Amino acid sequence: MSADRKTEPPQGKSQVATQPARKAWVKKTPVDVVLEQINKQEQKVNDLREELKKQERELQKLLQAKKVLEAS
């Protein structure tokens, strides 16, 4: 009967072996940490500006539609 069964590797060990290796940890200086935070904040502000531009365009479209509806 045991010949009919499929042999499967233990799940715990097979999953660990298939994951990619982690990057080596590189110690950062305080200057590097602050510069990284600045870059992240700049990116966040730029993303928010883009989102604000989209929202302002949408608002302008809705205000124009409101003018048309009020005029009729």
Image (cartoon, rainbow, N blue to C red):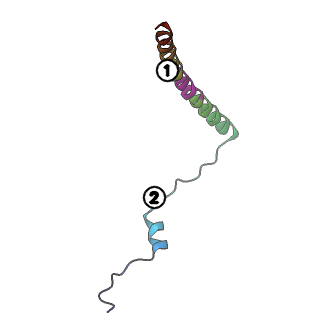
The residue most toward the right is 30
Prevailing secondary structure of the magenta residues:
helix
| 9 left or right of 62 in image | left
Q: Which residue is mark 2?
A: 20
The residue most toward the top is 71
Would residue 47 be counted in the magenta stretch?
A: yes
Q: Element at badge 1?
A: helix
Q: Element at badge 2?
A: loop
The residue most toward the bottom is 1
The residue most toward the left is 4
Location of residue 10 with respect to 56 vertically, above or below? below
Q: Which residue is mark 1?
A: 58
Quadrant containing the N terminus is bottom left
Give the extent of the magenta segment: 45-53
Please report the residue visible at 56 percent of the width from the left and 30 percent of the height from the top: 43
Indicate the amino acid at tag 1.
Answer: Glu
The x, y position of residue 20, in whole percent, is: 45, 58
**Between 1 and 8, the one nearer to me in the picture:** 1
Location of residue 10 with respect to 4 vertically, above or below? above
| 54 left or right of 28 in image | left
Q: Which numbered disc flags the more N-terminal residue, 2 or 1?
A: 2
Please report the residue visible at 64 percent of the width from the left and 35 percent of the height from the top: 37
